[in-house]
Amino acid sequence: MENKLLKFNDGGIMYYDTPLDDNGNPYYVPVVAKNRDYLVGYIEGMKITKSLISEILGQFDLNMDLGLIDVVLDSSRFNDVLETGQRESEMTDDEMRDYIYTVVESVTNQIDSNNVENNVGYDHVLSVECTCGLGYYSWDSIVDIPENSVKCGNCGKYIIHYTGLDDYIYEYDGGR
């Protein structure tokens, strides 16, 4: 519950208090949730959902490893800061098209169960990679997920940010 500072604009709308990097720029946070309980509930719900979808696809002989798809609670649902640090609102159409292509290609590679990167033999309930590229964190069990926000040990950016507030309180900032 570290983020008790509420930021309202002149119209009384509250925005997510986006963490800032060393240059004062907002950065992408891989996991943002009200608290650990919310995060755990989300993980458990997604596990059930992925299992059901996988079972349905299997009935049509479509075998995809949906467990590798990261459908996480990242900060981009509150603002337009992308993993690259760019704001979507400041990108050209060509830059946005290239970004989307890269993301889709990455997800497609993850779904491909023959991808060598997917055959590591690990079964984590949560894994998070920092955007600095030097911090990879994983938890093997729900009970291991930390109660407090987590920062990367290499760059100091949040990788899990607990806000202490329900998501519906926040308004999307739209590149303000």
Image (cartoon, helix red, strand yellow):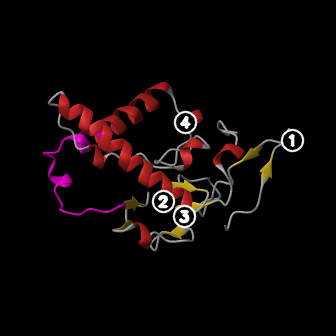
Q: Separation of disc 2 and disc 1 at Cα? A: 35 Å
The residue at 29%/49% (across/down) is 68
Q: Left of 28 or right of it: where is 57?
A: left
Q: Amino acid at mark 1?
A: Asp
* Of labels 2 and 1, the one closer to you: 2
Region in magenta: 107-125
* Of labels 3 and 4, the one closer to you: 3
The residue at 36%/50% (across/down) is 47
The residue at which mark 2 appears reads as 40
Viewer-proximal residue among 99 and 3? 3
The residue at which mark 1 appears reads as 10
Q: Left of 54 or right of it: where is 87?
A: right
The residue at which mark 3 appears reads as 36
The residue at 59%/33% (across/down) is 89
Viewer-proximal residue among 113 and 9? 113
The residue at which mark 4 appears reads as 88
Neighbour tally class for label 2: few under 14, some 14-19, many 20 plus, Cα within 10 Å? some
Q: Amino acid at mark 2?
A: Val
